[in-house]
């Protein structure tokens, strides 16, 4: 039996396009990042050489995943200057834009996990396994320890993102089995299981996100009617409550958790404009005026 879509009210009040604005922008961004690396192998148009772990754009701009660089350092491999520069550029970008924007705007695994989540909601598939979110932090630490012990960049040996890239470049379907396993895991085993509980890359970028500038704000929280649709679509629903419910204690409406992926799903799904993209210093709250009762209405109520 299909379940009610959390977007139903948003579609009705805002329209489909306005209710899927950030979703569509994310898909365009993910496709663009992927095509930047595939135009070379596919069409001999080398915009970027390498992959999301390490690349050189237009043979000029080096970009290096800081988590890959950290593993390299733990493996006692001193990187070249270009790798250090590339990691610095990427680090600065995510400190400004939000660490886990990588997860929702860049990572090619995200559309796969989003699809699994959408199917779960559509058919009411219940969560069967409960995993602690901090487990991905332990896994990230384990990756660094393994890199130190083995002298290799350990995660890149099994990274499903790298494997998916190889599958697309070399036409090797079996290399995408990791991505398929993640889809099945998220669909039948644990809700948002991979990104929300296991991925060590997400754990690393979540740590960066704690200091990031770009944020989601529940500045319109006074208009909230407790429909819970934002919790239904958010891949990290635990980040919402402190900002949304903080009106009772005067807490900031800014979602401060590094776990927030800035996917914009809460902005899309809410027809009452409770959420918007802001920055960490924007603590403004939109006050909703209390409804006024006319004298005639008061008299009518009194007679009733």
Image (cartoon, grey):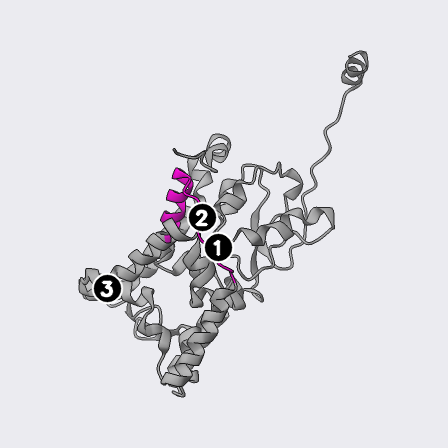
Indicate which label's residue lies in the foreground, 1 or 3.
1
Residue 130's disc is 1
Nearer the N terminus, badge 3 or badge 2? 2
**Image point (40%, 75%), residue name:** 68
Distance CA(mark 2)–CA(mark 1): 8 Å
Residue at 53% across, 57% down = 260
Q: Quadrant of the C terminus?
A: top right
Residue range in magenta is 113-133
Judge by depth and name the residue closer to the eye, 216 or 76. Answer: 76
Is 216 inside the magenta-drawn segment?
A: no
Rendered location of residue 232, percent (x, y): 50, 44
Q: Residue at x 62, y 54 (%)?
A: 254
Report if residue 268 is visible in the image. yes
Rendered view: 10 above or below 67:
above
Q: Residue at x 46, y 33 (%)?
A: 8
Residue extending furthest toward the front: 128
Residue for badge 2: 127
Q: Which residue is mark 3?
A: 175
Closer to the chain start, of discs 1 and 3, is 1
> Is the N terminus in the top left, top right, bottom left or bottom right quadrant?
top left
Task: Establish if 3 lies above or below 127.
Answer: above
Residue 239 position by quadrant: bottom right
Q: Are marks 2 and 1 in contact (CB under 8 Å)?
A: yes
The CA distance from mark 3 to mark 2 is 28 Å
């Amino acid at each position: 039996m299909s379940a009610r879509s959390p977007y139903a009210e948003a579609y009705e009040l805002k329209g489909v396009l306005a209710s899927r604005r950030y979703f569509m922008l994310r898909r365009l961004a993910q496709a663009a990042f992927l095509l930047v690396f595939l135009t070379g192998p596919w069409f001999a148009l080398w915009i970027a050489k390498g992959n999301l772990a390490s690349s050189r754009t237009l043979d000029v701009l080096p970009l290096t995943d800081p988590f890959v660089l950290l593993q390299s350092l733990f493996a006692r491999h001193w990187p070249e200057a270009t790798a250090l520069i590339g990691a610095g550029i990427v680090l600065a970008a995510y400190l400004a834009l939000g660490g886990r924007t990588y997860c929702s705007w860049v990572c090619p695994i995200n559309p796969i996990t989003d699809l699994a989540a959408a199917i779960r909601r559509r058919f009411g598939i219940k969560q069967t396994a409960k995993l602690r979110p901090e487990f991905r932090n332990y896994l990230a630490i384990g990756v660094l320890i393994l890199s130190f012990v083995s002298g290799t960049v350990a995660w890149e040996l099994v990274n499903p993102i790298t494997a998916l890239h190889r599958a697309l470049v070399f036409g090797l379907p079996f290399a995408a089995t990791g991505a398929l396993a993640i889809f099945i895991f998220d669909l039948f085993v644990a809700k948002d299981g991979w990104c929300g509980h296991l991925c060590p890359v997400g754990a690393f970028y979540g740590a960066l996100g704690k200091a990031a500038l770009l944020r989601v704000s529940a500045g319109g929280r006074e208009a909230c009617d407790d429909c819970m649709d934002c919790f239904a679509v958010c891949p990290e629903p635990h980040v919402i409550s402190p900002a949304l419910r903080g009106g009772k204690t005067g807490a900031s409406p800014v979602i401060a958790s590094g776990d927030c992926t800035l996917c914009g799903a809460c902005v899309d799904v809410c027809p009452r404009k409770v959420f918007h993209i802001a920055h960490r210093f924007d603590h403004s709250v939109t006050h909703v005026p209390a409804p006024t009762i006319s004298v005639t209405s008061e008299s009518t109520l009194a007679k009733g």
